[in-house]
Amino acid sequence: MNWRGRPLSSHEIALNTTIATTTRTGPHVGAALGEGSYPTGTTAPALRADERAKARAGNLQMLADPRLTGMSPDELESLRAQLAAAQAAAAEQHRYVLRKGRRVAITGRSRPLL
């Protein structure tokens, strides 16, 4: 299904829908159908959760390297703490806007969830 709720029943419809897409700034999105034959049923091996966590930790460690950041580990931690507070405040402000007002405490008299 595409964003209009119409089924993408053929390559032609999918391509035409993609080609007709524009952005607010004006550029058009292009698409083309590759006519080559490709093997079906092949999948990339899924990483296990512990392997993903280890890879993520390694990537974050590389990004925190003092040669890349130009800061000592202590300076980077101090900056992280400052930015975390600012990020939490921005997230709370965003939720305030979405709620259209302040948080309201639930008194416990509301209906049960189940």
Image (tube, grey):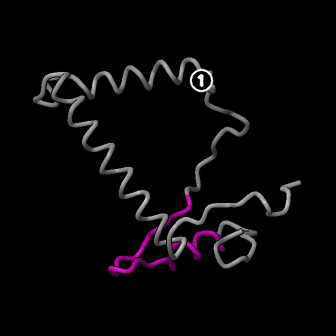
Assess whether residue 78 is covered by the magenta stretch: no
Crowding near the residue tagged with mark 1, few <14, some 14–19, many ≥20 C-alpha atoms within 10 Å: few
Left or right, residue 91 beside residue 73: right
Image quadrant assignment for residue 72? top left
In the image, residue 114 sits, relative to residue 109, either above or below, namely: above
In the image as oriented, which residue stretches furthest toward the left?
Answer: 70
For the point 21% across and 32% down, the residue is 78
Residue at point 32%, 79% (across, down): 25
- Magenta span includes 19: yes
Say which residue appears at 62% left-offset and 21% top-offset. Answer: 48
Label 1: element kind: loop
Q: Residue 29's x, y, as percent? A: 43, 71
Q: Which residues are magenta?
A: 12-33
Eyeballing the image, is 105 above or below 53? below
Query: Which residue is labeled 1 in the image?
Result: 47
Q: Which image quadrant: the C terminus?
A: bottom right
Q: Looking at the rendering, which quadrant does residue 112 occupy?
A: bottom right
Residue closer to the observer: 1 or 13: 1
Q: Amino acid at mark 1?
A: Leu
